[in-house]
Image (spheres, grey):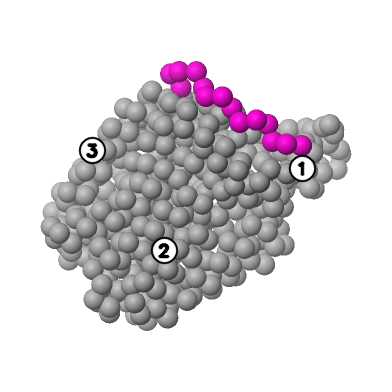
């Protein structure tokens, strides 16, 4: 039974905004952890003699697990709560990242950076932002989701230039220790401020006037996640959204996020300068993705996705030629591409909610995001292979651009047929 909230006791600032702020910091630091390998590839090549293809295996596994754990993370959070799950994930990230400073062999890199850090990062992925936005916000949900998604880009803005300077001046091991310390420092903040649902504080969601009681969940998290996948696989919209998001991951985290710095170094651009380009993308994406959330509250998400993927494809096709204009051409690319980096998330989450029900949007987006990370993992590995075999990233960048143009067409077909059967309501 819903309970009427005590409007006279309502605080001047709804606690949902505090939850959003804490989540923003968690996603920001998580993004910094995931972006760290981009400044470590060249140092690892120089110290250990590993090829880009060898390093790409560990990074690809990291990205793959980051995506595949997402839907299970949603189900686990539903069962055990936000605070405990986030604190546990941050502890795993801190320990795994710090331990990489001791590695000396490729298998250790694959184990620590690929499996341990990849598993921890899956709990603090974009599905966390979708979960928080859905639980705490009835209004301004698209805007909040845009801001939380943009924290991934802000993580690059905050961390990458500093980490690149550390790698050059103090060695790559100092980079892993700084990242581990930043992750560890977040745990007390999360333990103090994070709450699972508004009902835990006797509050309605932001924008509502009734308190919805916390559901009592008994379903096994793994079974619920797999049930969501089974329903999704029978849906045309799921395949379209997962397919476009596969291309999204391949063209962002997997290729540009992982290989832009090595590509810049190949063209004589210093590592710190190249990291600054990613930071510039972070600034632009903070603007672009937040604006995307605002637009998602107001316009057709299919049309937004078509524009986003089309513009991204054109920018990636331009990228190989931008090196001819040195830093100025790359700066133009960084601005144009950065505004669109992960602006695709808010409209994709909204379309998932329309197809499978608002209460299941985070879980189904978890599986769609898994496709994103499979694409990213594929591009991280293939990008390294292409560079190793051909000595250049030209083919990788052009192929990613063409794929984005295909995704732009695919997005227009979402929602053209009746939605798939929805998941059963959460047990109460």
Q: Which residues are magenta?
A: 415-428
Q: Which one is closest to the eye, mark 3 or mark 1?
A: 1
Quarter of the picture containing the N terminus is top right
Residue 417 lies in the magenta-colored region = yes
Q: Is residue 256 above or below residue 312?
A: below
Query: How far is disc 3 from disc 2 in space, using C-alphas?
Result: 29 Å
Q: Nearer the viewer, residue 323 or 212?
A: 212
What x and y, as percent, mark residue 224?
A: 61, 41
Distance Cα–Cα, label 1 vs label 2: 35 Å
Assess whether mark 2 and mark 3 are in contact (beta carbons under 8 angstroms): no
Graded by Cα atoms within 10 Å as few (under 14), some (14 to 19) or many (20 or more), the crowding at tag 3 reads some
- Residue named by callout 3: 402
Mark 2 is surrounded, within 10 Å at the Cα level, by few (under 14), some (14 to 19) or many (20 or more) other residues, namely: many
Residue 62 placed where, x, y %?
Answer: 42, 59
Percent from the top left, x then y, of residue 277? 31, 58
- Distance Cα–Cα, label 3 vs label 1: 47 Å
């Amino acid at each position: 039974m819903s309970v009427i909230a005590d409007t006279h006791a309502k605080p001047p600032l709804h606690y949902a905004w505090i939850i959003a702020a804490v989540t923003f910091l968690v996603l920001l630091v998580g993004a910094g952890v995931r972006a760290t390998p981009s400044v470590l590839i060249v140092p690892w090549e120089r110290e250990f003699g590993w090829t880009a293809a060898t390093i790409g295996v560990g990074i690809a596994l990291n990205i793959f697990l980051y995506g595949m754990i997402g839907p299970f993370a949603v189900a686990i959070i539903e069962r055990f709560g936000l605070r405990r799950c986030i604190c546990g994930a941050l502890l795993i990230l801190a320990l795994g990242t710090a331990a990489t400073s001791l590695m000396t062999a490729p298998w250790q890199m694959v184990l620590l950076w690929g499996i341990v850090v990849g598993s921890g990062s899956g709990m603090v992925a974009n599905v966390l932002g979708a979960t928080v936005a859905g639980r705490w916000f009835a209004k301004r949900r698209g805007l909040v989701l845009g801001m939380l998604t943009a924290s991934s880009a802000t993580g690059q803005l905050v961390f990458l230039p500093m980490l690149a300077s550390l790698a050059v001046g103090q060695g790559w091991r100092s980079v892993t220790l700084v990242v581990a310390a930043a992750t560890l420092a977040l745990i007390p903040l999360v333990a103090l401020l994070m709450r699972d649902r508004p009902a835990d504080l006797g509050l309605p969601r932001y924008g509502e006037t009734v308190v919805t009681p916390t559901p009592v969940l008994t379903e096994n998290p793994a079974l619920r996640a797999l049930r969501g996948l089974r329903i999704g696989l029978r849906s045309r919209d799921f395949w379209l959204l997962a397919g476009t998001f596969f291309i999204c991951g391949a063209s962002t985290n997997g290729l540009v996020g992982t290989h832009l710095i090595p590509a810049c170094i190949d063209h004589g651009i210093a590592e710190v300068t190249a990291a600054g380009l990613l930071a510039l993308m972070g600034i632009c994406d903070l603007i672009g993705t937040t604006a995307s959330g605002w637009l998602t509250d107001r316009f057709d998400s299919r049309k937004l996705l078509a524009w986003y993927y089309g513009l991204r494809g054109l920018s990636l096709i331009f990228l190989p030629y931008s090196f001819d204009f040195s830093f100025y051409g790359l700066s133009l690319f960084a601005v144009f591409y950065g505004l669109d980096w992960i602006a695709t998330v808010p409209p994709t989450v909204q379309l998932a909610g329309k197809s499978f029900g608002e209460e299941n949007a985070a879980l189904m987006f978890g599986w769609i995001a898994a496709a994103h990370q499979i694409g990213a993992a594929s591009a991280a590995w293939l990008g390294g292979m292409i560079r190793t075999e051909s000595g250049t990233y030209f083919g990788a960048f052009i192929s990613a651009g063409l794929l984005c143009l295909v995704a732009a067409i695919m997005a227009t077909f979402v929602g053209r047929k009746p939605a798939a059967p929805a998941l059963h309501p959460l047990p109460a």
